Amino acid sequence: MNNSSLVVATIVFLIGLLACPLALGCGPTSPSAVDNALPEVIINDSYYQLDGTSEAELRRQMDRLGPADQGHRPHDAYTAWHVGWSYPHLTTNDHCAIGPISVTVTISHTWPQWKTPPQVSPTLLTKWERYLEALDRHEAGHRRIRIEAGRAISQILSRLPTYPTCAQLEQAADRQAEAILAEFRRQERDYDQTTGHGRTQGAQFGSVIP
């Protein structure tokens, strides 16, 4: 990846199977389980500060101060996301089924924030504002993919049938969820390849300074 362009890191993908242990009991999937198939979405924003007075200074500061991914590669902006799900088990007639599903998608952005100097060039300020708009446009595409991943997990788990044992239910739930996550990871990679990590959307600012 080239630091001369915005590379929005994609993605720390943390998967949490929360709360309910999957070794308890169940009954038929209730209508409420399907009704609750929409995920809760939590978006957190944090910022690192820039105070450059030129495009070159801003570029150097982003290269130096920008958040790093898990491979310690610096980026202009970084996004971490976490999908967590939980559900109770219901038991009836010696069968195990899933209860109402609760899925949360947490998206945490780290953005550059420029403390503009008093005599900033209007041309530079306009260029920066357009860059930030393009950066958010690129990230909006990622957000849609992540939220859809949570929605798909909610729906597929809500529709699981009953199983003779809760261990079998656990295995089926894990297989379904992992297959969904693999598909949405692929969609993320395709999105970044198609957009050049945001470059084709205008999310590029400055050049590498030796």
Image (cartoon, rainbow, N blue to C red):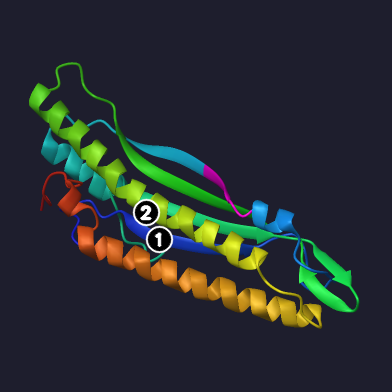
Which image quadrant is residue 73 in? bottom left
Label 2 crowd bin: few (<14), some (14–19), many (20+), radius 10 Å: many
Q: Is residue 178 above or below residue 193?
A: below
Would you place residue 125 above or below residue 74 in this image?
Answer: above
Residue occupied by mark 2: 142
- Residue depicted at x 14% and y 28%: 126
Read off the residue under disc 1. Answer: 11
Secondary structure at badge 1 equals: strand
The mark nearer the N terminus, 1 or 2, is: 1
Bounds of the magenta segment:
37-42
> Magenta includes 137?
no
Q: Which residue in the rendered view is the most extreme toward the top?
A: 118
Q: Residue 29 is drawn in which quadrant?
A: bottom right
Secondary structure of residue under mark 2? helix
**What's the residue type where badge 2 is placed?**
His
Give me the disc on residue 47.
Answer: none
Residue at 73 percent of width and 77 percent of height = 169
Quadrant of the snapshot with the N terminus = bottom left
Q: Toward the viewer: 177 or 157?
A: 157
Task: Identify which amino acid the numbered label 1 is placed on.
Answer: Ile
Tell me whether the residue at label 1 lies in contact with that at label 2, contact meaning CB atoms closer than 8 angstroms.
yes
What x and y, as percent, mark residue 111? 35, 41
Q: Nearer the viewer, residue 71 or 142?
A: 142
- As measured in the structure, the alpha-carbon distance from the residue carrying label 1 to the one carrying label 2 is 9 Å
Query: Front-most of 95 and 75?
Result: 95
Give the number of the mark in front: 1 or 2: 2
Tag count: 2
Residue 130, position as x, y percentages in the image: 18, 35
Residue 39 in the magenta stretch? The answer is yes
* For residue 18, side relative to residue 125 (left or right): right
Q: Residues within 10 Å of mark 1 (few under 14, many from 20)?
A: some
